[in-house]
Amino acid sequence: MTGGWRRPVQVLRRRLLREINATVHGADLHMERYDRPLGDPGLFGASSVVWRVHEHPAGMLVGGFAALMLQSLHPVAMRAVAEHSDYRTDPTGRLHRTARFVSTTTLGSSAAAEAAIAGVRRIHRYVRGFDATGRPYRADDPELLCWVHTAEVSCFLLGHQVFAGQRKLTGAGCDAYLSEVALIGELLGADGVPGSRAEVAAYLARVRGELRAGPEALEAVALLRGFGRSRRERLAVRVLTDAAVGLLPGWARNELGIRRPWLVRRLWDRPLARLLGAVMVWACGLSPIRAAAHARAEARVGTAG
């Protein structure tokens, strides 16, 4: 009797996992980035706080959507994206490339992570232009890179804390995450990367006066919230982006013109996203990327003797 329902449940679980991976990472998961060489911990290792945070699918997706909204409020960063990115014509490809970079630098081998970072740095050298005031910008500007990194990882952390339940981090754990993950920002060329909650708060307060929602930001957020290749995918994205809105500070929601009352955010958006997140966590327990990364990092490699 038990075996009669277990197999259909496992089939459903694997189907959901395939759909999630295909939506976020694309058809090819590039397992060679995660399963070799044996014994290689990557940039952080399986016992790191970075792995703990980045292995939670719901927290990362909701946090990632929040990060994209927050990042759009930097006029120079948004101008660079608008002028040099194909997010309008190929939003799925843009999502896949971003997700692959995050997963590769977090869970990938040392060589794969370093290659991904080097690839982004090469692209950044050619991303140049002028902002709305006519001032030149370049994507490899250390201060601009600091903004992109800080907005991203602070939202990842918030997403984890909201959706990880009993597995959420202590205050010291949050600071440890920010300190560890600062390495990626620094390797990309960022200067002054905040390494604790206090430093992130001080940094955001310092740059707050530079942030505003221009037409390009409003367009990007509208495209993001309507993203999806099917009705089911659009519904899932809407649930996740509504929850992501709840992670943004009030001033950011106001800038973006998003009006969702506190009661809606807390009593509807967040519980609905938690339900969807629970399904994702259940399905992603079988994640081949996570399994391969752990097997690689935790393998005991014998020495010749």
Image (cartoon, rainbow, N blue to C red):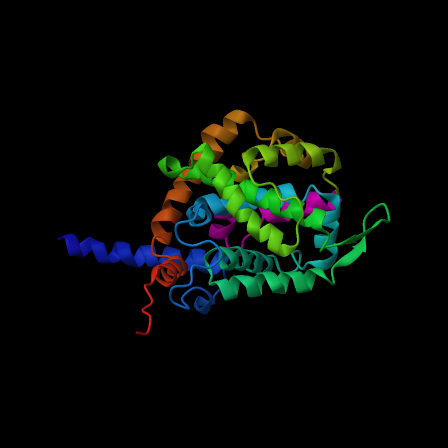
In the image, residue 195 sits, relative to residue 108, either above or below, namely above
Queried whether the magenta region covers residue 145, the answer comes back as no
Residue 45: percent from left, percent from top:
43, 54
x 64%, y 47%: residue: 148
In the image, residue 245 sits, relative to residue 25, either above or below, namely above
> Furthest residue to the front?
305
Can the viewer see residue 240 in this picture? no
The magenta segment: 215-238
Can the viewer see residue 167 in this picture? yes
The C terminus appears in which quarter of the rendering? bottom left
- 157 or 183, which is in the foreground? 183
> Furthest residue to the bottom?
304
Q: Does 226 sit left or right of 46 as displayed?
A: right
> Furthest residue to the left?
1
- 43 or 168, which is in the foreground? 43
- 161 or 200, which is in the foreground? 200
Residue 284: percent from left, percent from top:
37, 53
x 55%, y 41%: residue: 155
- 136 or 89, which is in the foreground? 136
Image quarter for residue 210?
top right
Residue 151: percent from left, percent from top:
61, 42
**Most prominent secondary structure in the magenta stretch?**
helix
Residue 105: percent from left, percent from top:
52, 57
Q: Does 38 sit left or right of 134 as displayed?
A: left
x 71%, y 36%: residue: 207
x 48%, y 35%: residue: 269
Image quarter for residue 303?
bottom left
